[in-house]
Amino acid sequence: MKDGKWKGARGQAGSGAVYGLGFVGALVYFLQHSNNLTEVLLAILKSIVWPALLIYRVLETLKF
């Protein structure tokens, strides 16, 4: 940063924040419906994948 120009990933944090909120929301939702350890582990896996599945369904519906 000697010349005063920062060459980092500007403006990229927003998508990570949205994914993080989606992950936390899905985790809370799926954990509320879990009764044993197996269901808790499945809830964690579902909450990781859920935001990607949501975007896939939206794009599929919009025919992109």
Image (cartoon, helix red, strand yellow):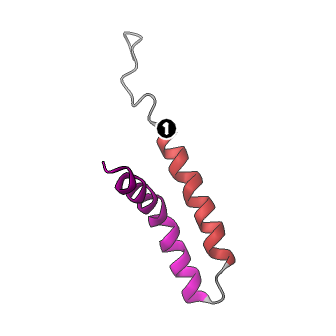
Above/below status of 32 relative to 47? below
Q: Is residue 2 magenta?
A: no
Label 1 crowd (10 A; few <14 / some 14-19 / many >=20): few
> As drawn, is 23 to the left or to the right of 54?
right
Relative to 54, say whether 12 is above or below: above
Q: Is residue 29 left or right of residue 64?
A: right
Q: Quadrant of the N terminus?
A: top left
Magenta highlight range: 37-64
Q: Amino acid at mark 1?
A: Ala
Of 1 and 10, which appears nearest the observer? 10
Question: Which of the 4 quarters of the picture holds residue 39?
Answer: bottom right
> Residue sitting at 37 percent across and 52 percent down?
59
Q: How many numbered discs sit on the rendered protein?
A: 1
Q: Residue furthest right?
A: 32
- At x 69%, y 76%, the residue is 32
Residue 12, how many percent across, how many down?
A: 44, 35
Q: Which SS class for mark 1? A: helix
Residue at x-position 60% and y-position 67%: 27
Q: Whole-percent x and y of residue 56?
A: 38, 58
Between residue 30 and residue 13, name the one nearer to us.
30
**Mark 1 — residue?**
13
- Residue nearest the observer in this picture, 61 or 49: 61
Q: Is residue 61 magenta?
A: yes
Residue 30 in which image quadrant: bottom right
Q: Is residue 5 above or below residue 63?
A: above
Type of secondary structure dominating the magenta stretch: helix
Q: Where is residue 64 drawn, in percent x and y?
A: 30, 48
Q: Residue furthest top?
A: 3
Q: Residue at x 36, y 23 (%)?
A: 7
